[in-house]
Amino acid sequence: MKNMNMKRNVQQGFTLIELMIVIAIVAILVALAVPAYQDYTIRAKVAECINNAAVPKLQISEYRQTVGSFPADTNTAGITTNTGDTQFCDATTYDGAGVFTVNIDEAAVDSSLSPTIEATLSPTVNVDGGIDWACTRGSTTSTNYKYLPSTCRAS
């Protein structure tokens, strides 16, 4: 009979210690995730500029395959002044030998970036006449290498 009179202890919620542990875990995860997410968004914006260089690459490639030499300037290749530009790209500059540089607008990408981020795209003519494009880091500062796509980090 004694057992029947004992009240049963039922837990009604979380203890303060359990809540503090959960909050500490969430704080640690946020502290790790936010910087990684910020780097990811910067890399995505830089990659957008480099991907928009597909149009000038195509125009230069077509000119080279049609005429047999690289265009002397962007007008000859049919590239307008704003081809490939977005809100994150300053402009592309062309050197007259097939090589062009994609200049990133660091202030538009993220106000905390130090200047300079750019990618240089250089053509190589294959034996069969096709053109391969190599991306290098151009004059990107060493602190900004991590924002370039991995294919553009070589010098």
Image (tube, rainbow, N blue to C red):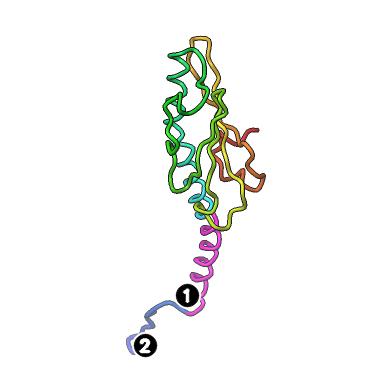
**Residue 13 or 5: which is nearer the viewer?**
13
**Residue 13 or 100: which is nearer the viewer?**
100
Q: Which numbered disc, 1 or 2, marks the residue closer to the eye? A: 1
State the image coordinates of residue 76 (x, y, percent, origin top left). Answer: 46, 24
Image check: 5 left or right of 97?
A: left
Task: Using the image, tell me which numbered label, if any, was put on residue 134.
Answer: none
Question: Which amino acid lies under the numbered mark 1 shown in the image of this protein?
Answer: Leu
In this view, the residue farthest toward the top is 128
SS category of the residue bearing label 2: loop
Quadrant assignment for the C terminus: top right
SS category of the residue bearing label 1: helix
Quadrant assignment for the N terminus: bottom left
**Residue 103 or 125: which is nearer the viewer?**
103
**Residue 148 or 60: which is nearer the viewer?**
60
Question: Which amino acid lies under the numbered mark 2 shown in the image of this protein?
Answer: Met
- The residue that mark 2 highlights is 6
> What's the residue at 54%, 57% (across, down)?
111
Q: Is residue 147 above or below residue 12?
A: above
Label 1 crowding class (10 Å Cα cut-off): few <14, some 14-19, many 20+? few
Image: magenta residue range: 16-36
The quadrant in which residue 55 appears is top left
State the image coordinates of residue 153 (x, y, percent, origin top left). Answer: 60, 36
> What's the residue at 42%, 27% (across, down)?
78
Question: What is the count of numbered marks?
Answer: 2
Is 114 magenta? The answer is no
> What's the residue at 53%, 22% (across, down)?
72
Is 29 magenta? The answer is yes
- The residue that mark 1 highlights is 19
